[in-house]
Amino acid sequence: MQIQPTHINNKVKEIFRKIYQGRKINLAASKDYLEEQLDLYLDHLGSHTGFKVANKDKERIWNIIERNNQVAKILSTPGYRKIVKRKRQLLGAISLGFVFCIDGRIPAIFLGGRFARHFETPAGEITTMKRKSDNKLIPDSSDLNEALRRIATTGDDFLEIVFAHTSLSNPHHGCGAMAVKKKMGLIDPKLSLEDANLKIIKEKTIPALFNIYNEFKAQLGLKPLKVVGIAAVYDTDTFGIILNYNQRLEKKSLSTTDLTNKYKDKLDEYSISKGKNSFIKDNIVFGSFREKFTDLKYSVAFAQNVLKITESLLDSKVANEALVEVDKYIDVHYEDLTPDQKKGLRFILIRNIAFQYLTGLCMIKRKIADHAFAKHGESYMAVAMRGATIGKFDPENQGFASTPSDPKQAIGNINTMLSIIGDSSKMKPYILFVCNSVNSRDLRENNQVLQRIMGSNAGLFIRLIEDKNLGEMVEKGEIIPVPILIEEDTREVLKIVDHSGYI
């Protein structure tokens, strides 16, 4: 073991004297000294691996953390919180969840915003196990299961939308996780990647969610739901949502992209009208955010305008035919949904029309889309067995993220991420954030809850290091693991955790 130089020890003492005050943690100081905590951790990491992290790579890591915290700050403003609150009101008395792929081209902030819970796993395929008592499939993730239990206790209805994804303009640029499965001979070669993905979702993910959620409902003496989850396809080119994608040839599918194009003229007419509720007073016109919807400084204005269009569509103030068509489709194809589930699904589809209208992305004129999420541009990886990961609310920067059920799945997910990133010299060394969510109060109190969270984070870190392939990459400096604690609501990074002593 290498002994740190005296000046380093003095620096450590000074920083942590300010952070640790008595038996508690000064939260403000922890956030103020994040960059110093990162520097110290990376220095300690290097002392154990013998590989010194270059300054340019320290800067890459810090830029990701700093950017993440800038996003968290904006999403925590009263203005943005007011928008989220209103969207939840429009959503109705329902808890909404999304399961989607770890692919960085699926931005959680745009797909589900802050009003839905997200669970990310390769190809939207959750790991499952067969319950011993009846051999039924249930999710293997205790974190996911207990989140579902908590939802069941509210008494509200629940709907999980499980997404496959595609690139409609380029069939060869679809789901990387499914491409890996095809290469390994794990899917029917006669099926497209999308259809094979939907088959997995319908035969595995959705039944497992159904079984465990209704088990919790029964335990509480509540009536089970006929439908807990539905499958959909997300198009990374247009940000469109497609229902019943496998029935597209029979023209029984529903696409928000098609709906936005179909009713664009009606929305345009409302934009240029002179009524008191007209869009024009807010400069809401087709494609008005085409070049700036990913710009952080326009996040609040963009979210506000998406909300205004959504409200107008739901209130039948504009393009009433769109709402009628959506409602009719839901009634015919999803008749077993409860009224509240139907209301929630309607909100998601209508909101997506508003999003695609403002961005103009319903009309892709080129063979390949050119917005920030059209191509793979992931600059880091992140895993979290408990809670959420860094970066998924960023409206511009891409990152791979997954919420695995256990360390074994985490290792598998990381290997999938590495296979998609490829061997680009621009990406090396690869940055891997090992995340855990924490309540600010628990961090401040430095209590037993925090101790268990730190233990969970350390456990995952250790298992990654013990893996032969990933461990060797860390020792060679090809992967830089960065353990962090993020605030469970805003996802602000609150602390860099120094797990270098486990290497």
Image (cartoon, rainbow, N blue to C red):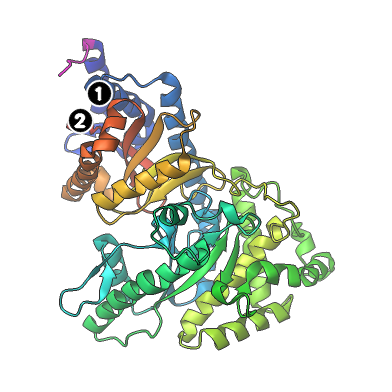
Query: In screen coordinates, is 362 left or right of 35?
Result: right
Image height check: is 294 above or below 45? below
Q: Please identify the quarter of the rendering in which residue 117 is found.
A: bottom left
Query: Which amino acid does the dot numbered 2 rest on?
Result: Ile
Nearest to the observer: residue 272 or residue 131: 131
Q: Which residue is mark 1?
A: 49
Query: In screen coordinates, is 54 left or right of 86?
Result: left
Which span is picked out in magenta?
A: 1-6
Query: In screen coordinates, is 179 left or right of 274?
Result: left
Q: Marks 1 and 2, how far apart in space?
A: 7 Å
* Residue 391 pos. (x, y %): 45, 45
Q: Work out whether residue 439 can be spotted.
A: no
* Residue 50 pos. (x, y %): 26, 19
Assess disc 2: are there few (<14), some (14-19) or many (≥20) residues with their C-alpha within 10 Å of its C-alpha: some
Nearest to the observer: residue 96 or residue 254: 254
Q: Which residue is mark 2?
A: 503
Image height check: is 444 above or below 472? below
What residue is rendered at 50% in x and 61% in y? 193
* Residue 197 pos. (x, y %): 46, 65
User: Which quarter of the figure is the C terminus placed in?
Assistant: top left
What is the residue that sits farthest to the top in this orientation? 6
Q: Are marks 1 and 2 in contact (CB under 8 Å)?
A: yes
What residue is rendered at 47% in x and 40% in y? 421
Q: Which mark is residue 384?
A: none
* Residue 178 pos. (x, y %): 45, 57
In the image, residue 150 lies in the stretch drawn in magenta: no
Image height check: is 20 above or below 143? above
Q: Main secondary structure of the magenta part?
A: loop
Query: Which amino acid does the dot numbered 1 rest on?
Result: Thr
Q: Secondary structure at mark 1?
A: helix
